[in-house]
Amino acid sequence: MPCYNEAESLPEFARRTKQVLAALGCRHEILLVNDGSRDGTLAVAKSLAAADPCIRVVNLLRNFGHQAAVTAGLDLTESDIVVLIDSDLQDPPEVIVEMVAEWEKGADVAYGKRRHRSGETGLKLFTAGAFYRLMRCLTKTHIPEDTGDFRLMDSRVVKVLRGMREQHRFIRGMVAWIGGVQVPVYYDRESRFAGLSKYPYAKMISFAIDAITSFSIVPLRLVTCLALGILLLALVAAGIVFVIKLVNPGFFIPGFPAMMITVIFFGGVQLLALGVIGEYTGRMYEAVKLRPLYIVEAVYGGTASSHAGCLNPDPSTTSKSGG
């Protein structure tokens, strides 16, 4: 569970999640990844870990972003199945029961698919829908619409994910790319239990760009098609002008506005092409630096690995590492 400024919702999230796990009756561990929160999230998480030996807290050195925090959690857990869920209670922990049932039937991935989304504006719903439909047109990987990162994954899928270390991460797309038996579990998304959304529109746009450039080279091809189309139109226009000049030499009056429109149009096309190429080049530049995706400041709790209901492969409370 990645956590960023979720001090108000964490106790209720832990309570509801523990109820679900108790109903399942399975050995478990709750891994809270604090992604550089600026409120009291770390203190609340540590108090929960102190009271429950099945809760472990991974504290990142600073805010690395949601997808990096998810990666840290996936790297530091070992189990037959892993459930990825945000701690803001918009995705109900109770849905995990249905996901486990699908896994027992043979699913490699059981992903949450939203029927209804409470507490979200019409603009956000529209942009989210447009994003998934755009991804469907641009990529060969089928990424289910109206989904998030809320999902259950078999250990085989998690193992493959650990080997995928690209800097600009789109976890739900990476899981879809892996393949296997992936089934939806439908649910109604709730309003936030407390606090404000950690994904404003600027972050959503950045996330969408990361997703598109990570899974598609179609924008580069579109720029090439645009250049070829403009070249073709220019040749046609030149031919038309040449014929008109032959038939009626005085038809055209040279003008400054026409010249400026032409210059601005082609200049805009060139800048667009450079911008798209720059997006991909910048991602290659960041990839070749091979910097860690995250840095773990410390791991707290989980010391009672022998607890009957807990699964804790690494009970260290002071480990520091990068990933």
Image (spheres, rainbow, N blue to C red):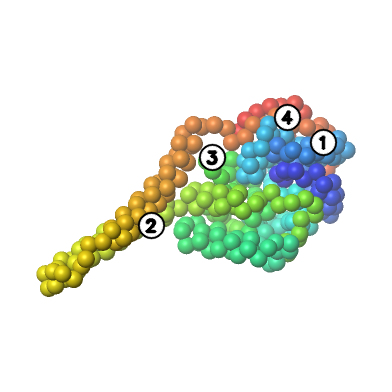
Identify the residue under disc 2: 222
x, y percent for residue 285: 45, 36
The amino acid on which the numbered mark 3 sits, given as a three-letter code, is Gln
Which dot, 2 or 4, sits closer to the camera? 2
Q: Nearer the viewer, residue 10 or 181?
A: 10
User: For the residue carrying disc 4, how many other residues have a C-alpha within 10 Å: few (<14), some (14-19), or many (20+)?
Assistant: some
The amino acid on which the numbered mark 1 sits, given as a three-letter code, is Ala
Q: As drawn, which residue projects farthest toward the right?
A: 51
Identify the residue under disc 3: 167
In the image, is 5 to the left or to the right of 137? right
Q: As drawn, which residue projects farthest toward the left?
A: 246
The amino acid on which the numbered mark 2 sits, given as a three-letter code, is Leu
Identify the residue under disc 4: 298
Q: Nearer the viewer, residue 39 or 48?
A: 39
Q: Is residue 260 above or below residue 317?
A: below
Identify the residue under disc 1: 43
Q: Is residue 321 above or below residue 25?
A: above
Compute the Cα span from label 1 to label 4: 13 Å
Query: Is there CB contact under 8 Å for labels 3 and 2?
Result: no
In the image, is 235 to the left or to the right of 304? left
Residue 67 in view here: yes
Q: Is residue 63 above or below residue 209?
A: above
The amino acid on which the numbered mark 4 sits, given as a three-letter code, is Ala
Sequence order check: which comes first, mark 2 or mark 1? 1
